[in-house]
Image: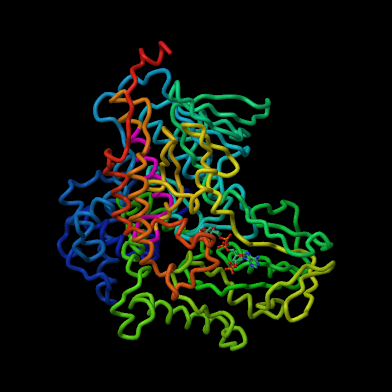
Amino acid sequence: MRGTEIDRAYIRHAIEAADLNAVRMTLYQNTGDPDLAALPLQLDDGQREWLIEKALSWLEENAGPHSLPEPPEAELRRLMNMATGEEIGDLEFEARREQAAFRKFPFLVDWVGEKPRIPDDVSVAIIGGGFSGIVMAVQCELLGMPYIVLERRAEFGGTWNINRYPDVRVDTLSSTYEFSFEKSYRWSEYFARGEEVRSYLDHVASKFGVRANTRFSHDLKCAAFDENRDLWRLEVDTPDGLQTLEAKVVVSATGLFANPKLIEFEGDDRFKGRIIHPARWPEDLSLEGKRVAIIGNGSTGIQMAGAIAKDAEQTYVFQRTPQWIMPREKYGRPVEPEIHWLLDNFPGYWNWSRYLAGAALFDTHALVTTDRDWQAGGGQVNQGNDALRKDLTEYIKNETGGRQDLIDRLIPDYAPFSRRPVVDNGWYRALTQDDVELITHPIVRLTKSGIETADGTVHEVDVIVTATGFEVVKYLHPGRFIGRDGIDIHEAWEGTDGPRAWIGMMVPRFPNFFMLYGPNSQPVSSGPSQVTWFTVWSAFVGRCLKRMLTDGVSRIEVTQDAYASYNEALDEEAAKLVMMTKEGGIEKNYYVNNEHGRVQVNAPWYGPVFQQMFSNVDWDALEMTAKTEAASASE
Ligand code: NAP
C-alpha cells in the first residue's frame, strides 16, 4: 500500500479488525498447525491473543499476494466442518463446497475437454443487464456460446440502476452479495452503497467480456416461439426503431423488482406537492427545509428514512403494518484499509471470510417453519423464532429509548420471518427525533396540501415518498412471451392461480425459455446469498445448453406432468411456512399472492435440497427434441 508502512502494529490492527474464525481457518490451511484446529469457535481472551500473535508472526514472514488452490475434496470437507464446528452432511457439503470459491468460476459449468463446435443457429438472448443477466452472460462466455444481452436502460445495474433514493445500499454483507468469480474487488463499505454496486457490475461486465455483447437501450417488447424453426423471434424497441432479432434460447433476467407499485390514493390529483416512488427518484430533488411523508416501511422505506429526516424540516413516517427490523453489525461502516491489506496479502482469507459470512444463513430453515410440538408446549412458532422475537422486541425497546407511545405501535403481532427481514438503518432512532413523527392511523385520502388520516388529521407536506414496493406478481411484465400454440404466458397464468413455473425457471409450452428469479424461486432460507442463487440458476441453463449442443437438441421444454407434480409438492411444502399460518399473518405480504392465498415469490424448500434441483438436473422432467443441423437447414 503506497505511503503506508506495513509494520507489526499495522498487521495487528488488520487481524484485530478481521473475522477471527476466518483468520484461524486461513492460517490452518496455510500451516496445518493442529493447535489451530483444536481452538473452539468462541475464543476466550487468552486464546484470542494466542491466535492473533500466531497469525501476526506468520504474516510477517509470509504475507504476499498469492491465492490458494482448492483443497482435495476430503480436505475441503474437513475444513468446512472445522469452519462451523459441525459435521456437515453430503447434501450440505455439495451445496456449500463452492462457497469458499477456490475454483476460478465457482458454481458455473464448463466443458470437460475440448469445447465443441457451436452450430451457427444456436445463440442465447439474455433479457436484462442486472446481476442475474451478467452472470448468465459469464456462463455463456465460459461455454463459448454466442449470446446477446438486451438491456432497456443505458447502463448495467437492473434494480441497482433504478433505485437511487437516499442512502440506498446493500443490506446483506457485500462480501456475500458479489460474484464468486471476481476475486479481487475491494468494497469500500461492508454494505456497499447503490452507486458502488453499479460500478461493480460495470467493472465485472467489462472484465468478463459481457459489455461487448450487450445492447443498451434495447427494450424487449415481445418474444414469440417459431415452432417451425425452433427459435425465438424477438421484437425489440431500439434507438433505431423496432427491430426483430432471433435466438435459439431466451433467458429472462428481468428480476423481481423491475416494476414499481404505484398506489393510487383518493385525491392524488389534487395534491399540490410532489409524489415520488423511490425507484423513480429525481436526481435534482432537494429535501432541505421540506415537509416529507414516507409511506411504507419495507426495506426501502426503512433504509431511506434516516437520510431523509436529516435533510427535511419535518418527516412523517406512515406505517400500515409494523415490521420486524433487525440490526446488522458493521452496517454503514467503511472497510478498513487494514482489511483490504489482509484480503490482498493473506492467501485464503478472502475465501474463508466470504464462506463464514454466508454461514450465518446455513441453518435458518428451522426458523421459518412451524414446530407443532413446540406450539403444543405453549410456544408461538418454534424455539429459534420465538427467541428471535424476544430479542427483536428488546431491540425495539432499546432503540426507542423506552418510549411506550412508539413501542406499542412498533411491535408486530405476527412472527419474524413471515416476511422478508428488514434491516435497521437507524429507523427506530430517527422516530425518536423531534422532527420525525410516526403515524399509524390509516390514510384516507390526499388533500391539496397533505395526507388526511382516519382520525381526521391532515398532515401538511410538500413531498410524498411512496415506498410501497414493487409489482412482484407481474413476472416478466411488460414483455410479452408467446410460446407454442400461440399461448401468451400472462394469459396462461391469469387463467390459473397466478404465475408458476417448474423449479422457478421453466413453463410448459415455452421451449428454450428460462427465467432467472421466476415464480417461487427465492429460497426462503438456508442457502447462499441471492447473487449465488443467480449463479446457480445460470449454471442450470448452462447444463441445458450443454445438453442441447452435445445431443443436437433443438427444443427443450418442461413436461406438463413434471410442472404439475412439482407445483403440487411445492404447495404442500409451502403450507409449512410460518408466513402461511395465522402466526405469520399472511395477508398483505408480497411473498404471498393475496388474491390466490398462496406463496408466490419463495421456494419453500430447505436450501441445499433446492440447490440440488439445479446441479443434479432431473432430465426426465424435460422433453427434448433433437433436430439435426441438416434438417433445420432444409426447412
Ligand atoms: P415492500 O417490502 O413491499 O414494502 C412496501 C411497504 O409499503 C409496506 O410497508 C407496505 O405496507 C406499504 N404499503 C403498500 N401499499 C400501501 C398502501 N396502499 N397504503 C399504505 N402503505 C402501503 O417494498 P420495498 O420496501 O420496496 O421492498 C421490496 C424488496 O426490495 C425488499 O423486500 C427487498 O427484497 C428489496 N430491497 C432490498 C434492499 C437492499 O438490499 N438494500 C433495499 C430495499 C429493497 P404493508 O406492510 O401494510 O403492506
In the figure, 168 relative to 619: above or below? below
For ligand 1, which image quadrant applies?
bottom right
Q: Going by the image, does 243 lie left or right of 69?
A: right
Res. 381 image quadrant: bottom left
Front residue (pair 147, 263): 263
Residue 271's x, y, as percent?
82, 63
Residue at x 40% of width, y 27% of height:
145
Magenta: main secondary structure equals helix
The answer to whether residue 499 is left or right of residue 154 is: left
Magenta segment includes 531: yes
- Residue displayed at 57% across by 36% down: 151
Task: Answer yes or no: is residue 176 visible.
Answer: no
Towards the viewer: 555 or 164: 555
Residue bounds of the magenta highlight: 524-544
633 versus 136 height, above or below: above
- Can you say which quadrant of the picture contains the C terminus? top left
For image coordinates 63% across by 73% down, the residue present is: 319
Q: Position of residue 262 (x, y in %)?
A: 67, 56
Farthest residue in the top direction?
A: 634
Compare residues 364 and 630 and report the one nearer the observer.
Answer: 630
Q: How was the colour assigned to the protein in this rendering?
A: rainbow
